[in-house]
Image (spheres, grey):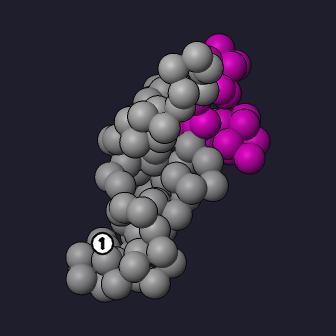
Amino acid sequence: MLDALAATGLLDGRQATTQWKDADKLARRYPAVQVERDHIFVRDGSIYTSAGATAGLNLAMAWVEEGFGQDVALAIARRLVMFSKRSGAQPQISVHLMAQVPANTTA
């Protein structure tokens, strides 16, 4: 989906993010896009991009917080049984998740 948006030129000169495994490919294909490789979501003006499905939930919570305030966003996050409400600049690879990976494997 983000590839299609970039192909239109709407992301030229803007910051955007995508899932970590696709970030380098996006940057190569569309050099005019400033790819934020380690953000879970990015807002650049009226354009919002996220790094994947769960990052999209965090983006949705940011929209709710922006429009209705932190209390409403936290109430919805609790209702969705979200582990936490993350900001967009947080790394895509969760420290909490990496702590659960056995020492003899890689994520």
Residue 98 position, x and y percent, is: 46, 33
The answer to whether residue 67 shows anywhere in this view is: no
Of 23 and 96, nearer the camera is 96
Quadrant, the C terminus: top right
Instruction: Residue at 42% x, 63% y: name it.
Output: 83
Q: Reply above or below: 34 against 7.
A: above
Assess whether residue 103 is covered by the magenta stretch: no
Instruction: Residue at 53% x, 31% y: name it.
Output: 101
The answer to whether residue 48 shows anywhere in this view is: yes
Assess whether residue 2 is covered by the magenta stretch: yes
Residue 47 position, x and y percent, is: 49, 53
Q: How many badges with numbers are in the image?
A: 1
Task: Please provide the residue range marked out in magenta.
Answer: 1-29
Q: In the image, what residue type sits under mark 1?
A: Glu
Residue 51 position, x and y percent, is: 56, 43
Instruction: Residue at 59% x, 37% y: name it.
Output: 18
Q: Which residue is mark 1?
A: 66
